[in-house]
Image (cartoon, grey):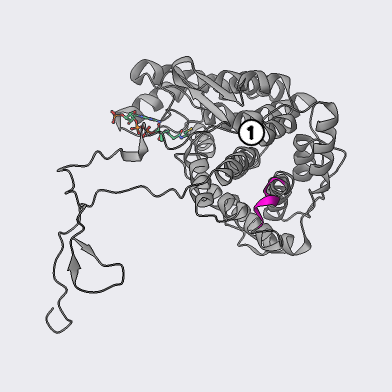
Amino acid sequence: MINKPTGSPEKMVNPDYVPEPEKMNVKKGLEGCVIDQTMVSKVTPETNSLIYRGYPVQDLAETCRFEEVAYLLYNGELPNKSQLETFEKAERNYRDISKNNLQVIKLLPAKCHPMDSIRTGVSFLGCEDERVWDKTANEDKALRLLAKIPTLIAADYRFKKGMDFIAPDKSLSIAENFFHMCFGKIPQKEIVRAFDVSLTLYAEHSFNASTFTTRVVTSTESDLYSATVAGIGALKGPLHGGANEQVMHMMLEIGDPAKATDWMLKALDQKRKVMGFGHRVYKYGDSRVPTMKKYAQKMADLTGGQKWMTMYESLEDVMAEKKKIYPNLDFPAGPAYYMMGFEIDFFTPIFVMARTTGWSAHILEQAKNNRIIRPLSEYTGTAERKVRTLSER
Ligand code: COA
């Protein structure tokens, strides 16, 4: 039965009405649904492969800097030397954030999670940009986010510790500059390299929950900043980006590598979801993990953090043996960021600083060939009934 769109109370029957099937084929969590086409990246779980614009992510991580990967995601091709120079110059010139935005970050409650600070800071960037509705400026807005998000994160980091803001340094790469803005110094090149590799590995991953969120928002013809704010909200959850923080909380809870096996057996016995394991798409292992694990091990060698890697091995072994479930990228990234010296609450914001590239690439793609995303649901509520007046109820 269909009401007239005029709101008339009388009912009419659509001549084309076909009764609903007894039971709709609900795909809980959209599992296995192909929602749209994309040229940005492809995950092939059977071969544990992930390609960005055709290039294997492991090769990009080992061969390129994060800036080159960002350019690739936005433009479809790796940059040549002069293209990279122009791109980096523009990115570096955009790193400053306004005094007002700094003030907003400073005024947030000290205990608010950094993901909430970044979400607010990005929202403010949208308010400040007069081109907010101008789709032709989307590529430039994406660059603006790439440049300014690290500054927002570092500002929040410093303010939460009661320290002064450190302005970005245009002579430094994105990775170097982030250490500079957080700690006032740049660590050994191996640590900067491991961080840069993590940004490449986190940059893009097809239609994951936060990227899909950004595409849904874009599909309503909303703006790039709003889509990014929504993406940050989706990434914050522990089943998605928030897992890298939970992994480190779990490792600290276990404390001693000798206790890891028993801890895992007990967790599985209690049917707990162990953070940093499992994936909706990968069932035989995450293509990004071997690279990140290698760099996490390098961090352990450099910083004396071997206990985290010993614990890693034990947890991984028990989970593989008992459940055939394997680590995802958040599992090595958590301890790697910890050994680099970052506060745990800042692990997911670092993920944002990388994933803004993938989000923007998808937002640009969605906006260019758009149709509003509007799925259906199977109604399981009360059958249609008569509305009684207040005195009748
Ligand atoms: N720990 C323990 N068991 C897990 C698990 C984990 N991390 N991930 C999956 N499983 C088990 C489930 O309990 C379920 O077992 P069952 O069939 O006996 O009930 C089975 O594996 C399928 O899991 P399911 O939750 O249906 O998979 P999903 O595709 O809906 O969820 C994740 C995927 C990533 C959300 C899920 O693996 C998870 O919560 N992982 C931990 C959080 C995390 O690391 N997120 C980052 C993802 S990159």
Residue on which the image places disc 1: 337
What quarter of the picture does the C terminus occupy?
bottom left
Percent coordinates x, y for residue 223 in the rendering: 59, 55
Magenta range is 134-139
Q: Residue furthest bottom?
A: 391
Residue at screen point 86% across, 30% down: 82
Q: Is residue 168 left or right of residue 296?
A: right
Find numbered disc 1 in the image and state the secondary structure of the residue it sits on. helix
Q: Is residue 125 left or right of residue 285?
A: right
Percent coordinates x, y for residue 297 in the rendering: 63, 19
Percent coordinates x, y for residue 349 in the rendering: 61, 44
Q: Residue furthest front?
A: 15
User: Residue 69 magenta-drawn?
Assistant: no
Give the image quadrant in which the ligand numbered 1 is located.
top left
- Which of these two is toward me, 28 or 174? 28
- Which of these two is toward me, 378 or 183? 378
What's the residue type where badge 1 is placed? Tyr
